[in-house]
Amino acid sequence: MGADVVEAGDLVPTRDGHLVCRHEPEIGGTTDVADHPEFAGRRTTKTLDGDPVTGWFTEDFTLAELKRLRAVERIPANRPHNTLYNGRWEIPTFEEVLRWQDEQTRKRGRQVWIYPETKHPTYFRALGLGLEERVAKILRRHGKHRRNSPVILQSFEPTGVQRLSRLVDNPLVVLLSDADSRPWDFVESGDPRTVADLITPKGLREIASYAQGIGPTLDLVIPRDASGRLTEPTTLVRDAHRAGLLLHPYTMRNENPFLPADFRTGTDPDAYGDVFAAYRTYFATGIDGVFTDQPDTGLLAREDFVND
């Protein structure tokens, strides 16, 4: 589809210490695990970053057991066409993705980049399944731990990114949720700061001391009003660039429910909206890139914007 970089999934561990790529450690929504009666007894409730979550968790399965499952569409109500692929693919390991990256680079004659995320690192560290050390070990094994390696690492937990900065030289990105939220590592350590504190000029300079970029929600770039329509851009792009940071906000999606109200079209809540106009509005803020679930659309929008 022409993507510049592939977000290779969120990295979560198995019971036997392998890293696999899943959206969350809870896999009830992204695999067919519920259809496997032999795993019915694994369904449980855990507290994940302060919230109770019921389902099946990767840390309760060995890699061999996870390989018996198949991936399914996470939000079929919004993306019914994607259910066509339910059951087609297994859960990949991080190492399989790194090998896929090399294969695709050779096949396409251009470097394919990936953008993995360490998911819930504080939660897993408490279970004795620290993510950062495992990521670093695998990257070093594949010779992809250097500053010029085509692997960008990201996390919502700043201390996890700091830990990675001491283990590898890859480009690093701090993900940022809503302004009034607190990274879970801050909650656990008693750090009172919120994301609003991290996106001040002072907070951005601190991030720049150990990371090369930030991944804010799109609403931190352009907030929405009570009706869901866009308001005026914030100073975040300017402030981050002054601190020497790249900005890759998340996530552009084509479907109406995910777009600002300004760009929703028709009466079907899950139809595609005027996503090209939405891209144009966000690109005009000066962001350096954007996470998107439809990279072909994003590339067309970028071409339009550059040629305007």
Image: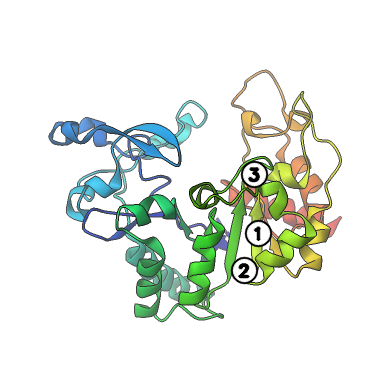
Q: Is residue 268 visible?
A: yes
Placement of the N terminus among the 4 image quadrants: bottom right
Q: Position of residue 124 (x, y in %)?
A: 36, 53
* Residue indicated by mark 1: 214
Structural crowding at the residue carrying mark 2, measured as other residues with C-alpha within 10 Å and reported as few (<14), some (14–19) or many (≥20): many
Q: Position of residue 198 (x, y in %)?
A: 69, 54
The circle drawn on residue 173 is none
- Which of label 1 and label 3 is nearer to you? 1
* Residue at the extreme left of the image, as rendered: 38
Q: Secondary structure at mark 2?
A: loop
Amino acid at pointer 2: Ala
* Residue indicated by mark 3: 252
Asked if the residue at tag 2 contacts the one at tag 1, i.e. Cβ–Cβ closer than 8 Å, the answer is yes
Q: Secondary structure at mark 3?
A: loop
Residue 100 appears in which quarter of the rendering?
bottom left
The circle drawn on residue 211 is 2
Side of 231 where 113 appears, left or right: left
Residue 302 appears in which quarter of the rendering?
bottom right
- Which of label 2 and label 3 is nearer to you? 2
Q: Is residue 115 visible?
A: no
For image coordinates 48% across by 60% down, the residue present is 116
The CA span between labels 2 and 3 is 23 Å
Placement of the C terminus among the 4 image quadrants: bottom right
The CA span between labels 1 and 3 is 16 Å
Side of 244 where 108 appears, left or right: left
For image coordinates 62% across by 68% down, the residue present is 211
* Sequence-first tag of 2 and 3: 2
* Sequence-first tag of 1 and 3: 1
